[in-house]
Image (cartoon, grey):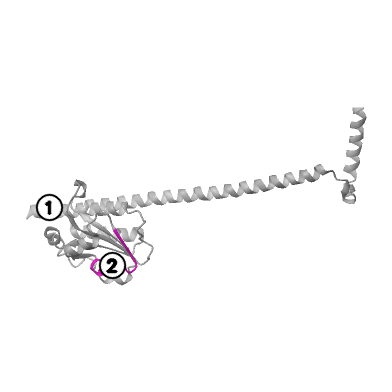
Amino acid sequence: MDSDLNIQEEQIYSWLKENPDFFKKYPELLPAAITASGKVLNLEAGQLKSLQKQNEQLKERLESILARLNRNDEIHQAYHAIQIKLLTAQTPQELITVATESPEEVFDIGRITVAICEAEKNITGLCVDMGDDFPKDRLFFIEEKELLSTLNNKEAPIIRVGLEGNNRHLFFGSYTKHIRSEALVPLFSHPDKGKSQLIGSLNIGDPSPSRFLPSDSTELLQDLANVLGLCLSRLANCQTINA
């Protein structure tokens, strides 16, 4: 009985294979299973397409993460190179120039300057005569009261955006009109020895109002300012000893 059934199925299969248009003429004879199979295939195709889309999204996220990691590595290497230049600077002119011009060039920042507290006589005396080659509007001397008031007597950088602060000209001179956001980073003498004397600020400003925001991380800026403060104190102490 089973053998007869197999023979009939083979005959039907062979005949249908030779007459592929049969079900086009009589679609009502198509078994329900074929329709169901088509739905299953469509569902699987949809799932495959969804998985492919998720895979592309994961790939884009991975590429974005790798790009950020590479960028962060480049930033740290650039900061390290600048810090080495600061530590090896032999004159106040060289020190201020490296601290202001190098980060500007490497990180495409609008303007970087240094402000020194007028009460720090050793450092102000060191920086009074920078020579004709020293760029203008890079170094400013500010009254201690004004400096403390602006920095709120805090160790963390002060971020100001837009029209915040009415004394921006004290930190950026003639470039003030171009500044839309800024980070004023306190400079301390011997920052590696705990609480130390405030001697000024490293001022970083940019024409973009979103370049510096209160939510931004400022650790690298503080590291740079710490090295600058240490180097200024070292040069001032050397001058005092030599005198």
In the image, residue 11 above or below residue 23: above
Residue found 70% across the figure and 46% down from its top:
43
- Find disc 1 in the rendering and name its residue: 238
Q: Is residue 8 above or below residue 138?
A: above
Closer to the camera, 22 or 66? 22
Which quarter of the image is occupied by the N terminus?
top right
Disc 2 target residue: 165
Q: Secondary structure at mark 1?
A: helix
Q: Nearer the viewer, residue 185 or 233?
A: 185
The reply, left or right, for residue 91 in relation to residue 204 is: left
Q: Is residue 72 left or right of residue 17?
A: left
Q: Return the x and y of residue 206 as percentages of the image width and height.
A: 34, 65
Quarter-wise, where is residue 207 in the image?
A: bottom left
Q: Alpha-carbon distance for marks 2 and 1? A: 36 Å
Compared across the picture, whether 240 is left or right of 22 comes to left
Measured as percent of width and height from the top left, residue 186 is found at 24, 57
Sequence-wise, the earlier of marks 2 and 1 is: 2
The reply to whether the magenta stretch includes residue 159 is: yes
**What span is in magenta?**
158-171
